Every structure is written in C-alpha cells, then in structure tokens.
C-alpha cells in the first residue's frame, strides 16, 4: 500500500481511505476502512469515464448485477455511488495473492492446488451462469487465492466502460491474452461460453506459467486466439482434455461450466478441442474495416463466400480485420489492476455452490420454517423470512464472555436478523434434530433474500441486500 497523494480522497461514503493499492486503465484503487474497522477495496473510476454520457447508468446497472454474484466465489459488493463526481465501488477486501502473482513468484501450481483452483473456478462460473451473470474478463489477475478458496473479483466497472467514448477513440485497455474467440473477433454476443474458454486459458496458465496465445503484439495475440491450436502437452493429464474442451473455438460446442465442474470432480472425460481448425469468416462476426482518421464510418466488410479458405488475400484481410477490432474488443475486457492484496498462497480450496441456490420454501426437504443440517450433522440451521440461525453441536472456538442482556444459551451458534450484521446467538432451544433435511456440501439454499451455502468448512449465510452475514464451523466463526 502506498501513501495517499495530495489530490486523493480522504473519505468515500462511510469509508476512511488509508492508502493507494494500484492504478489501472479504469481508475485508482484504494484500501479503506469502515466505522466498524472492516477493510474494503475502493475503486474510483477515472474522470474521463465519468464524463461519458452513458457510463453512469451502465455503471449503476452493472453494480446491481455484481451484487447478486455468489458471495462465496466473489468479493461481495459493499457500497457504491454512481452519482459521485467520480463514481466509486467498494468491495470486500480479499486476503491472498492473485493467481497471476502466485504463478509469477513461485511458478505453476502443484497438481493438488491446480485441481482445487480449477474446480472452484468451474463451480463458481456454473453458479454465476445459473443466475444469468457473465464475467467476460476471467484472467489470473482477477482471481484471488483466498484462504477459503479462489475468488473472482472485479465485476461492474469493465462492462460499464464498454462502448464509452474512451474505448471508442483508441484508449487501449488491458491485455487480450485470456479473451475468447468471440471477443477477439469483435462479436457483440458474449455469453457463458466465453467465460468457459477463458477458464481453459486460465487453467493452462496455472499449469504452465504462460498463456497459450501470447504473441509479440496485441493483434498477433488476437489472431492466435482465433486461429491457433495450442500444444497442451505441458498440462497435467487429468486436466489436459478438460482444457482442450474449454478451448474449442466454436462457442456452441464448448462444454458448460457445470459440465467442466462435473468432469473435474468425477474424473470424467470431456471432448478435446480439434487439432485442426478453420477460422470463422468475417461475415459471421461483422468485422469493420479500419477507420481512416478524420473520415466517417467505414462500411462493414463482407467476405466473398466463394473465395478459397486458404487464399493469401483472405488471410491478409483476416489479420487486418483482427487488428482493426483490437480497440473495440479490448474495451470490453479491462478491469482495474488487482495486484493489490498481499498474503500467502492458499492450499486446496473447499467446495462452493455447484449450482444456483434452491428455494427453501419450495423444497420439501426443509419444511416451514426451512430447517436443514450439514452432512456431518454438526451444524443445524433454520431460515425464516426475518431471521437465519445456525447452531453448532460441537465447537472448538473460544466463546466470548456472555453479555448481561443474554438470559438463554450464549454462543451456541450465529444469527442473521433483517438489516443487522451477523451476531452470536442467545437462545432458549436447540435446532439439533435427526429429522432435519440435509443440505449437501456444495448446495446453496435461499429464502427472503438470504443465501446459505453448505461447505466442507462449514456454513456461510449472507443477505444479498445488506451483504451482512456469518460463517460458522466447528473450528471458527466470522460475523460481518
């Protein structure tokens, strides 16, 4: 963390700004602290973006979408002000290095950690796609290796910046090395398959220490993404076929993130990418011709369908078109540089939610009010429209002193009441009962805006509205 400069803000909303973390093409990132002493990453966009007429509305929309992302897989959005002179976004501070920093400092991940990170990312993307979210900028610098497992950061700003005057006028943003072919060729349809392709590139990078598509120039990288079939021999055998399937050029034939997660978890094989690939024609992606300076828009070029696929003239036009769309494609993918958090690398990750949360009120396993236990039976929880409570049958953490206001059993578990942060419980009964439905590891359940996830390390419950919640296990608890 660097010292604040004279023109840096000292406060942002409820946060006191402590210092600078990093600066990227989108803005400045600070570390802040709230009145309760909790740290946050504060991202303030550049004034050029703030001046763009459509940016603020897109920023507001993307922040709302980011707030719905699974909290166990992301850095949850804590607060934002799209109407500030320079819009800003606060997210939870994630302890741990980025995947990029870990690989740069220590080399490729060892096989056990590689498998854990790959599985966690596939599980997380499956959950994101299940609720209609697409990240569009999955890359090692956006993946934090937190103690509880890999987390994907930086939702909200990059998508809002897409199509601003800044990106349209040639301000190059970010690196294209982890883009999908759809992004590299300027397609306007970027969906879940794009994230799956980027996941394949990330797994390749984590296994080998390099991207399979890096070239001497950005345009060369884009060309390789659309045309080059990488050598996967350096990727460990358990992941080699999975990476190959993710790197399939045709988005319609890639596996889903859920299929990737299942293959990684069960050791099943996915179809590998073809060894020979014919690049798509410019007709399919509507590539614009290079726009001469001080002239009006150029017409969209349509390739002659009768031209031979391997003709030199066509290949030359493909390269020129790829270079021409570099600015547009890159504008969709830069997020703030996230080499901003320090800490030691994590070991194997725990299991996250394998799919979108189920509705507690509609699932017959849980009853009304909804009650469930973990597969071990050590944690039992109850969810109502006003409160979520989890009890621990056996605990090894130190119990804080009993407050004078508690007349029941103190710290048997945790409680999340509407609008308040998570608290230790003071109760007169017990939730433990053999007839409770089981929330399997990797499952998530939601009720009244609160999502609870069962993991091998315990249960985490969080309000999607306030982002308050708790994590509880036999060994520890966390209130936020």
Image: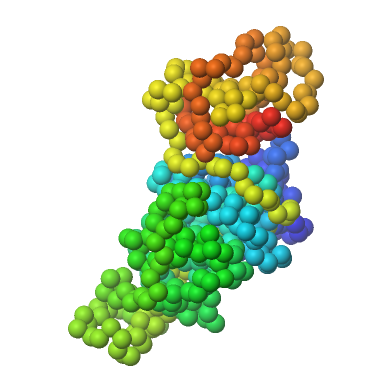
Assign the C terminus to one quadrant of the image: top right
Q: Does any portion of residue 308 appear in the rendered image?
A: yes
The answer to whether 106 appears left or right of 288 in the picture is right
Q: Does any portion of residue 156 appear in the rendered image?
A: no
Depth check, front residue: 304 or 126: 126
Residue 27: image location, x then y, percent: 59, 60
Residue 77: image location, x then y, percent: 56, 44
Assign the N terminus to one quadrant of the image: bottom right
Colour style of the rendered protein structure: rainbow
Depth check, front residue: 438 or 284: 438
The answer to whether 93 appears left or right of 224 in the picture is right
Residue occupying the point 40% across, 74% down: 275
Residue occupying the point 49% across, 35% down: 444
Residue 14: image location, x then y, percent: 65, 40
The answer to whether 252 appears left or right of 123 in the picture is left
Residue 43: image location, x then y, percent: 61, 53
Q: Is residue 404 above or below residue 116?
A: above
Residue occupying the point 28% across, 71% down: 284
Question: Where is residue 281, by image quadrant?
Answer: bottom left
């Amino acid at each position: 963390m660097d010292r604040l400069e004279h023109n840096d803000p000292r406060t942002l909303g409820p946060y006191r700004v402590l210092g600078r973390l990093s600066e990227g093409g989108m803005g400045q990132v600070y570390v802040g602290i709230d009145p309760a002493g909790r740290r946050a990453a504060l991202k303030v966009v550049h004034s050029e973006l703030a001046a763009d007429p459509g940016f603020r509305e897109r920023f507001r929309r993307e922040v709302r979408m980011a707030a719905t992302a699974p909290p166990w897989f992301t850095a949850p959005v804590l607060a934002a002000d799209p109407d500030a002179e320079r819009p800003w976004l606060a997210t939870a501070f994630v302890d741990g290095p980025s995947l990029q920093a870990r690989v740069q400092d220590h080399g490729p991940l060892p096989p056990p950690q590689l498998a854990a990170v790959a599985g966690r990312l596939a599980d997380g993307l499956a959950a994101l796609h299940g609720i209609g979210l697409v990240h569009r900028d999955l890359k090692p610098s956006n993946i934090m290796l937190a103690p509880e497992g890999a987390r994907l950061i930086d939702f909200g700003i990059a998508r809002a910046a897409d199509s601003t005057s800044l990106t349209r006028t040639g301000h190059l943003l970010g690196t294209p090395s982890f883009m999908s072919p759809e992004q590299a060729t300027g397609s306007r349809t970027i969906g879940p398959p794009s994230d799956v392709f980027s996941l394949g590139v990330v797994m390749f990078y984590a296994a080998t220490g390099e991207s399979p598509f890096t070239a001497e120039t950005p345009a060369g990288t884009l060309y390789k993404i659309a045309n080059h079939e990488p050598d996967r021999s350096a990727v460990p055998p358990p992941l080699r076929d999975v990476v190959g399937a993710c790197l399939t050029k045709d988005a319609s034939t890639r596996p889903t993130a859920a299929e990737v997660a299942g293959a990684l978890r069960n050791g099943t094989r996915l179809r590998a990418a073809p060894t020979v690939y014919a690049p798509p024609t410019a007709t399919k992606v509507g590539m614009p011709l290079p726009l001469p300076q001080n002239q009006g828009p150029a017409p969209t070029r349509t390739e002659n369908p009768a031209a031979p696929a391997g003709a030199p003239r066509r290949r030359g036009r493909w390269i020129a078109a790829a270079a021409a769309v570099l600015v547009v494609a890159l504008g969709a993918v830069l997020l703030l540089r996230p080499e901003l958090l320090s800490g030691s690398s994590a070991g194997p990750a725990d299991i996250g939610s394998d799919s979108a949360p189920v509705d507690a009120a509609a699932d017959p396993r849980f009853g009304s009010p909804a009650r469930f236990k973990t597969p071990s039976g050590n944690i039992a929880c109850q969810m109502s429209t006003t409160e979520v409570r989890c009890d621990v049958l056996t605990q090894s953490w130190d119990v804080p002193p009993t407050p004078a206001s508690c007349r029941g059993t103190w710290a048997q578990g945790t409680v999340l009441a509407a609008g308040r942060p998570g608290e230790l419980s003071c109760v007169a009964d017990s939730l433990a009962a053999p007839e409770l439905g089981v929330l399997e590891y990797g499952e998530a359940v939601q009720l009244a805006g609160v999502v609870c996830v069962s993991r091998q390390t315990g249960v985490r419950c969080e309000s999607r509205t306030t982002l308050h919640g708790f994590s509880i296990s036999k060994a520890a608890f966390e209130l936020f």
